[in-house]
Image (spheres, rainbow, N blue to C red):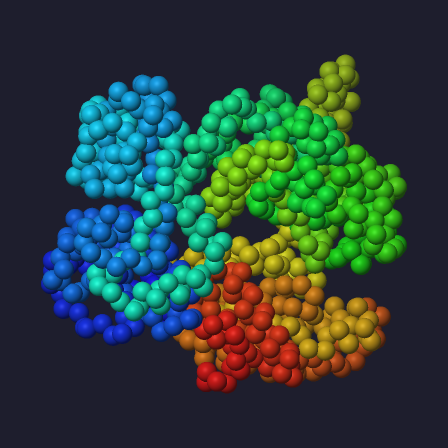
Amino acid sequence: MRKQVRRGLIWLMLALLLQTGAAHAAPTETTIRIAVEAGKPPYTQLLRDITLVGAEQSALEVELYVLPGADFRHALTAPGDTQIDWFAGVRQSEIEQHGFVAGPVLLEEAIYIFSRRSMPHVADLGHASGYVLGVVANSSAARWVSAHHTEQTTRRFADAESMLAAALAGELHVFLASHFDLSEQGQLSELLTQFPLDRRVQLFSEPRYLAARHADTRLAMIQSALEFSSTEQLRLLHVRANSGLTGLVSVQLDELIWLDQRESIRVGVPDDSTPVLYFNRHGEAVGLDADFLGLIESRTPLSFNYVGCGTWEQCIEALARREIDVLSFLSDTAERRDFAVFTSVYWQTPWALASSDANPVDANDLDELQGKTLALTRGYVNNAEIAQTEGIKVVLVDAPGQGLQAVLEGKADAYMDSLPLLVERMREQHTGTLHLSILRDYPGDQVNFAVRNDWPVLRDVMQRAVDTLTYDDRAAITERWFDVQYEEGLSFERMRRWLIWGALIFVAVVAAFWFWNSQLRREVRRRMRAERRMRYLARHDELTGLPNRHLLRDSLQQTLASHERYRRQFALLFLDLDGFKAINDELGHDIGDELLKQVASRLRKNLRKQDILCRFGGDEFVVVLTEQQSAQQSTQVAEKLVKLIVEPYQLKDSRGHGGTAEVSVSIGVAMYPQHGDDAATLMRRADKAMYEVKSQGKNGVMLVTGNGDARPAKDDI
């Protein structure tokens, strides 16, 4: 088992056994040696995040020793061994038993009551009267039982392993344990068959501490690091740590009682909402949101019943009238909070335009649509904003299909909708003559689950399930439903009729067959070209051909995973051109576009194949330098790019007019993992460093420091 803790550099300690007696150098005042029990990954993950932040606030050096359970318990009871005197995940009872000093709480470990499938459901200890109940001796669960349950029917065990073995042998009706206790059981599948997870009920939470053998001033340093950690990040870690073996979320007893009083939860399904949520020909609810809700059902006691609710606007009204309980794919607004409460964002997608091939509309933002008529579906969150945008005329429709029809009939220049809905409408209606354009610089559609506001308990349970959704969960669902596919446009029923009619005149049959076959081939080729263009536009910048911010997001996730796995560094460079706006305004947009293409070409030619280059938007670019040896190496590359960009450009517009132009560039540099271990943090800090360059005269490079501030790159050379 490999775990890492970072403070500027990466320390990787191999799992050691205390009984080997290997010699270690005496710890310094800032060296912290912590033992972690194998099979308890949440503690190691929490320590890594806490000490990463702590490295920015203090001079902590952390060494982790991952020990098998028996060795970890031996270390707790071996006061003469001075190699390890800090322990992660210690219970309050163990602190009292061994005279330890309690540090910060690392995790609130949920304790559940598990009941056998063959017996009536046990919702609390009051229902367990007369049953044989198992607990681990000297645990907080044992003390809880002593206070709430008769001792005559309680069996106490030395450890969780022996208790679970007794449960498997049929000696227990119910037992108290955490998900971590179950994860160490060798016959887990058989255990969960007899004591299913959907019958468990949370009784209380037990704090797990970071504890020291003796009073130690360094506990205060760890406590300080914990206070600087992201509250939201730690909350999500706690939720996922307690989500159990299959991602099930914790449900309190009062919540379970509330849910048991409701047979099912009504989820609204709007008309014309393929592929987000719709009924297939068998009457089953399917789509992207059906998959998300399916994950929520699998991780909670919730049961969803899908009901049609009409147009999008009618569905919102149905939620307000409480005719439905949940509506998915809805953005959180102040107006909607009058009748709904919202989970956090579970998915986001760019907005796109569909226009006629004969009169294509291409735009990156709303201000480029002046003089245009846009068709919009009633009830969409941004309708008011678009209607108030100067120069844009709005035509409201009831459904996406009507919006595309308005474009085909010339009543609107373009129809605007979220990208997956728009692509699906174009596929279903066989509208190969429509042109697709993505609003790259306009904020994407961020969607939530909306719940009727008199049911906050339902929102809370759904929120905990949303918190457990991982990047892999979202990627798998998106890949399944966001893959643009085309069906053949030729009707087989029509072909059958032609063959029947042509049976009377053989020559006519042959002629008709070859005519329609050639038409089909041309249509398929045209739609395949449109499909390739849609795929390309969804992930690339149309002007420069570079990856866009959506492809950058996916590439960054892969880069983070590979560099974390092999303990390597990479650099994220945020570039912003100096003086581009003046050239664009004075010489025109054609010259500005040509300048951006030449800048992109220079950058591409001077970077390695394994590096990532992206146009982030406007005159901003992002470069990811993979497998870097040091910050000095990365800043040297950045300074080379600065010198490269300032060289003059020979520019011409479409009419051959133009001349020589010059721009410079400001670059902010953030290093992984020193300046962040996630994409958002690295982007934010590199962007901040870039603006520091702007404020100090532009045309330079600034490196992020350990605490997130920026300093000139020359300080590191």
Q: Quadrant of the N terminus?
A: bottom left
Q: Position of residue 442 (x, y in %)?
A: 71, 56
User: Is residue 111 visible to us here?
Assistant: yes
Q: Position of residue 606 (x, y in %)?
A: 56, 74
- What residue do we see at 50% from left, 85% from top? 714
Q: Position of residue 428 (x, y in %)?
A: 70, 34
User: Is residue 534 visible to us here?
Assistant: no
Q: Is residue 441 above or below residue 282?
A: below
Residue in front for this viewpoint, 182 or 664: 182
Q: Is residue 564 left or right of residue 463?
A: left
Quarter of the view holding residue 127: top left
Quarter of the view holding residue 196: top left
Q: Is residue 514 left or right of residue 539?
A: right
- What residue do we see at 32% from left, 19% from top? 119
Residue in front for this viewpoint, 318 or 313: 318
Quarter of the view holding residue 168: top left
- What residue do we see at 62% from left, 33% from top? 454
Total marks shown come to 0
Residue in front for this viewpoint, 642 or 715: 715
Q: Is residue 78 above or below residue 286?
A: below
Which residue is the extreme one toward the top?
Answer: 504
Q: Position of residue 654 (x, y in %)?
A: 81, 68
- What residue do we see at 64% from left, 24% from top? 307
Q: Is residue 440 above or below residue 152?
A: below
